[in-house]
Image: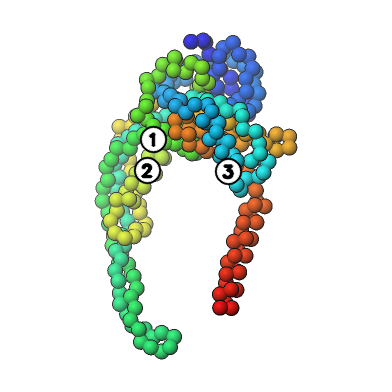
């Protein structure tokens, strides 16, 4: 395997590895050009696992093109932009797991039917039913293992972007070996482990809250309060496969929208520029239909 060199993108802050003989490169995250002058930096953690690319380049490119063309409420200049510069990148991320212990309390609602009599518009007595809710306080304890939480370790790819193309199939994990990266771009972890750990803890806590909400009995619930702690925390650095496409659009190609494609599943994520003209036109049409239907009903 050829030696690697590293450059730091001054636009988005990502640290990208390329073959050592290259002296110029284009950042795959924001399409900014860079001159490689810095040697490979030491002191960063070594990946423990790698998830290999499964989705081939052409399939990923087709998925990205369909996503761009079908962004119906995006600006037309974006929908007509060239979709070509797709690059496969091994993005650094942390795989997090922990044992969760939580105390919770909530108001649980049980529905029941109540029968009552009333008078209709013609003065007749009628019997009707209505649904009412009886509320009770419930508290308890919950314990479970929270695993497979993946958070970004890249300054170039934000955590919500990585979440947008999740999940990854972690059953396909390989132990890290440099030969698995041969022919691919791989980014070094540019976020501190402690910072990533906090992102993972926040996700794990949110998952515990969602799990408890799902197991509560009753027909309704409100005021769920959860106090949780995590123990036996494990955090391993891995590289996940992501196809990255910086879509340049606009008259001078000065605007950039980053599109990500999961290198396993083909899931696509991006934030296309909204066309408020299209959105307002749709709202006007919907309001027109509603008003037209109401006027028609008045004349029947």
Distance of label 2 from label 3 (alpha carbons)? 32 Å
Residue pictured at 62% horizontal, 53% vertical: 279
Q: Colour scheme in the image?
A: rainbow
Query: Disc 1 vs disc 2: Cβ atoms closer than 8 Å?
Result: yes
In the displayed structure, 2 sits above or below 107; it is above
- The x, y position of residue 195, in whole percent, is 46, 32
- The x, y position of residue 112, in whole percent, is 29, 69
Seen from the viewer's position, the closer of residues 58 and 28 is: 58
In the displayed structure, 88 sits above or below 146; it is above
In the displayed structure, 258 sits above or below 181; it is below
* Circle 3 residue: 70
Residue pictured at 66% horizontal, 39% vertical: 80
Query: Disc 1 vs disc 3: Cβ atoms closer than 8 Å?
Result: no
Rate crowding at label 1 as few (under 14), some (14 to 19) or many (20 or more) other CA atoms within 10 Å.
some
The C terminus sits in image quarter? bottom right
Query: Looking at the image, can residue 159 be seen?
Result: no
Distance of label 1 from label 3 (alpha carbons)? 31 Å
Label for residue 62? none
In the displayed structure, 110 sits above or below 234; it is below
Q: Quadrant of residue 67?
A: top right
Rate crowding at label 3 as few (under 14), some (14 to 19) or many (20 or more) other CA atoms within 10 Å.
few
Q: Quadrant of residue 174?
A: top left
* Circle 2 residue: 207
- The mark nearer the N terminus, 1 or 2, is 1
- The x, y position of residue 235, in whole percent, is 37, 28
* Circle 1 residue: 149
């Amino acid at each position: 395997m050829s030696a690697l060199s590293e450059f730091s993108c001054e636009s988005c802050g990502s640290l990208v590895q390329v073959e050592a003989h290259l002296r110029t490169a284009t950042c795959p995250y924001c399409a900014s050009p860079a001159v490689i002058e810095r040697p490979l930096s030491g002191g960063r953690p070594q990946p423990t696992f790698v998830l290999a690319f499964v989705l081939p380049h052409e399939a990923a490119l087709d998925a990205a093109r369909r996503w761009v063309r079908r962004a119906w409420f995006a600006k037309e200049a974006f929908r007509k932009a060239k979709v070509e510069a797709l690059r496969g990148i091994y993005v650094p991320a942390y795989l997090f797991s922990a044992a969760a212990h939580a105390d919770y309390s909530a108001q649980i609602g049980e529905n029941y039917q109540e029968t009552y009599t009333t008078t209709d518009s013609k003065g007749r007595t009628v019997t009707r039913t209505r649904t009412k809710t009886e509320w009770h306080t419930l508290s308890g304890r919950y314990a479970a293992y929270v695993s497979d939480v993946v958070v970004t370790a890249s300054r170039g790819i934000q955590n919500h972007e990585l979440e947008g193309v999740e999940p990854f199939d972690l059953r396909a994990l390989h132990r890290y070996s440099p030969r698995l990266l041969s022919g691919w771009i791989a980014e070094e972890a540019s976020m501190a482990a402690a910072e990533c750990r906090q992102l993972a803890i926040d996700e794990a806590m949110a998952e515990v809250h969602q799990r408890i909400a799902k197991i509560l009995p009753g027909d309704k619930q409100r005021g769920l309060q959860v106090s949780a702690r995590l123990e036996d925390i494990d955090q391993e650095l891995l590289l996940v496969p992501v196809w990255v496409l910086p879509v340049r659009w606009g008259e001078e190609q000065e605007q950039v929208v980053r599109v990500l494609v999961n290198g396993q599943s083909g899931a696509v994520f991006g934030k296309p520029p909204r066309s408020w003209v299209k959105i307002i036109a749709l709202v006007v049409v919907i309001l027109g239909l509603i008003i037209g239907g109401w006027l028609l009903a008045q004349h029947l």
